[in-house]
Image: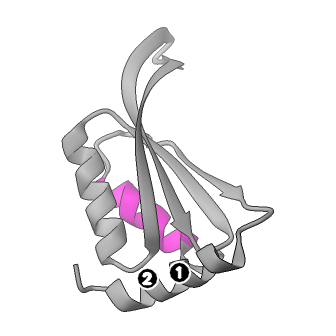
Amino acid sequence: MSLMLLQTTTTPENSEILIKEALESGLVSCVQKVPIKSFYYWENTLREDSEILLTFKVNQGDFEKLNKLIEAKHIYEIPEIIGVHLDFVSSKYQKWHNETKKLHKGVL
């Protein structure tokens, strides 16, 4: 695992679809789901919306596949998809991540 992908959506239904598809595909080992408040401009109007922040743990080699999965299943016209390189991941967590992805690919 070398990246964390950050992604936002507005509906619990869309977040559950994205989470389950990412896990079932074997692209990620873990996803966090956090309610947030977002402030941004859309169509020249300042917006304030309740959103759901999803954080996916993903290997660099799987990032583009996860990006395409999210774009295909997302309800937004332009979904926020941001990759953050991780400077440190504990060896125990990294081992769990790798084993979990292998064991559960296509199983859930």
Q: Regarding mark 1 in the picture, which secondary structure is present there? A: helix
Q: Name the residue under label 1.
A: 96
76, 18: nearer the viewer: 18
**Which quadrant: the C terminus?**
bottom left
Q: Residue at x 49, y 59 (%)?
A: 56
> Magenta region: which residues?
63-73
Q: In this view, does 52 lie above or below 82?
A: above
79, 105: nearer the viewer: 105
Q: Residue 5: which numbered mark, if any?
A: none
Q: Which residue is drawn at 28% across and 43% down?
A: 75
Name the residue type under label 1: Trp
Q: Residue at x 43, y 82 (%)?
A: 100
Contact (Cβ within 8 Å) of mark 2 with mark 1: yes
Q: Name the residue under label 2.
A: 100
Q: Is residue 89 left or right of residue 51?
A: right
Few, some or many residues within 10 Å of mark 2 (<14, 14–19, 20+)? some
Q: In which quarter of the image is residue 18?
A: bottom left
Q: Give coordinates of residue 32: x percent, y percent.
A: 44, 51
Check if residue 53 falls in the magenta segment: no
Is most of the magenta stretch helix, strand or loop?
helix
